[in-house]
Image: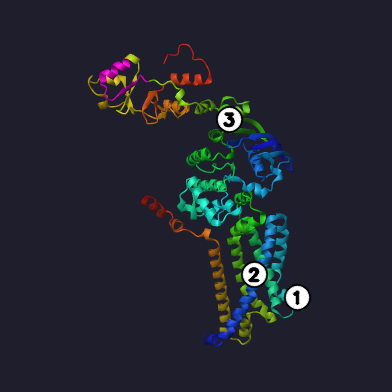
Amino acid sequence: MITFESVTKRYPDGTVAVDELSLEIPAGQIMVLVGPSGSGKTTSLRMINRLVDPTSGRILLDGQNIQDSDPAALRRGIGYVIQQGGLFPHRTVEDNIATVPVLIGWPKSKARGRARELMDLVGLDSQMRRRYPHQLSGGQQQRVGVARALAADPPVLLMDEPFSAVDPIVRASLQDELLRLQADLHKTVVFVTHDIEEAIKLGDQVAIFRPHGKLAQVDSPQQLLAAPVDSYVEDFVGFDRGIRRLSFLAADTLDLDAQPIAGQDSTAAQALQQARRSGDAWLLVTDAQRRPRGWVAAADLESLPGDTKLADVRLTTGHGHTFRVDSDSLRAALDATVLSVTGQAVGVDADGRVVGVTSYDRLRDAIQRAEGVPAAEGVPAP
Amino acid sequence: MSWAFDNASMLAHLTGQNAYLALVPVLIGLVIALPLGIASARWGWLYPPVLSITSVLYALPALALFVALIAYTGLTNTTVIIPLTVYALAVLFPSVVDGLRSVPEPVRQAAVAMGFGAWRRLATVELPIATPIVIAGLRVAAVSSISLVSVGQLIGIGGLGYLFIDGEQRDFTTEIVVGIVLIIVLSLIVDLVLVLARWLLTPWQHKTRAERRAAATSGAGREQLVEGL
């Protein structure tokens, strides 16, 4: 656990970078520090490994005041990843990764063995171990940076905008990778970013900073989106926070509609009757394994001979994006619904079999249920 | 040409002397430039005054220095070595500072943040990264030092410079030409050794085959390469 106790950093010219910061960073979790530039988030991070010393206040690492420790020894126990990688250009990938183990006195062969383990862990091909950093892509360099920070298995990892210099697709995969690693490693991670999306995706807790080093709010991402403390936080988390909150609501709270679904062995006449009974304009056709094939418009069925099997009917449109009922969020369900031509999206189980379909009404009900709002009168019963 | 063969042992001796008189100052210059450069890179305020001093020394005429030194060191090698050391230092000092300043700030910070002590960081991170620029300085210093040695002949200690004075006095052009050729050859050999040293010391700067190909392929050629893929 890392504890900031009324920590202030004031520079000789009078600039206050961090102002009376008190913050608890729980062990084994990701704490994201987010804020505009000049809000003191990087300074706060750099005070943890004493790259910057506070003007007043204390920082405790597992109860010990870090000011009492030898800076070099302290730093060897704290992994550090920065935006530009900061890799040693004159050392190979494996020697970069082995840096801290060698510093703390491991024999070189053992340190290199550890480096290879870590390359595997962060998803780098072991054939790259003899390459130099300039021979790698930006994303690969960041992976080396993460591996290097983890090499001596430090309990604490400091990450200063580590993914902001790579393109959005690589960034997303690095973020996923970090979450995957963290699920196994349970490090105490302090992560600085100016990107609120990244903060919300990665953080167990998110600390939002105001300009000049004042803390605005510390909360879980859900809570930040649901209950920003003031207009500054509300503006910072963004105008579509309502939509983004849905990321934290599970799709299994949706009451899906199983009515407008017909197996491909049904005939056109049966399907038409089914659609008329339920009043649905569209029917989802499924295959023998109950996997979605596509939508057929009820109106199209009327012109067909009644004994035509649905398997032989030309589908009006594909089934579009599906979402996993057991693991996706309401946001994914909403997104798939918005993108669907029929205004309905297909929810599937882990094997890709259809569970049911959405509608805007059903989405609204699920959201209101999640917020504890009683369903309005007059909403059609599911 | 036959003159050169007839006098091979004298020429070898003069060449050896020239190399010695030229390279010892470069070595001493480097030994002085390193701590001075390291200090100036660390404490930036040191750099301008030290640079002014070395530049002013560089501007002093070699002959004036030789003459002034004779009073103290007499007609010895030292009288030639001291001025040449000053010139080598003037070239090498800014190279060391530039080399150390070429270490990217994120790299330096990463080294600090990983728990390198100041000396270890200097020895294993900063100096290796500075090496190419320091060697570039060494090449300039070594070659100019080799040709400057001849000036020492005016006080009788000048390596291959002997051939110029002697050739001039005897009105014997061959001797002068041989002297010039030997100085050029000596410079080329020393330069080659330094280039080789850089290649050995900086393996990270070697281009891979693919990189060389990419550098050689440009414009239309590169488009073809992409289409080929």
Q: Position of residue B124 (x, y in %)?
A: 61, 57
Q: Position of residue A219 (x, y in %)?
A: 60, 30
The residue positioned 40% from the left and 55% from the top of the image is: B221
Q: Residues within 10 Å of mark 3 (few under 14, many from 20)?
A: some
Residues indicated by labels 2 and 1 sit on the same polypeptide chain: yes
Query: How far separated are the C-alphas under marks 2 and 1?
Result: 23 Å
Q: Position of residue B177 (x, y in %)?
A: 56, 81
Question: Which quadrant of the view contains residue A14?
Answer: top right
User: Is B194 left, or right, of B151 in this rendering?
Assistant: left
Indicate whether residue A339 is drawn in magenta: no
Q: Kindly identify which residue carries mark 1.
A: B68
Residues indicated by labels 1 and 3 sit on the same polypeptide chain: no
Query: How far separated are the C-alphas under marks 1 and 3?
Result: 78 Å
Question: Which quadrant of the view contains residue A316?
Answer: top left
Could you tell me which secondary element the residue under label 2 belongs to? helix
- Image vertical order of residue A48 relative to residue B129, above or below: above
Q: Are marks 2 and 1 in contact (CB under 8 Å)?
A: no
Circle on res. B27? 2
- Image vertical order of residue A126 relative to residue B185, above or below: above
The span picked out in magenta is: A258-276
The residue type indicated by label 2 comes to Leu
The residue type indicated by label 1 comes to Ala
Q: Kindly identify which residue carries mark 3.
A: A220
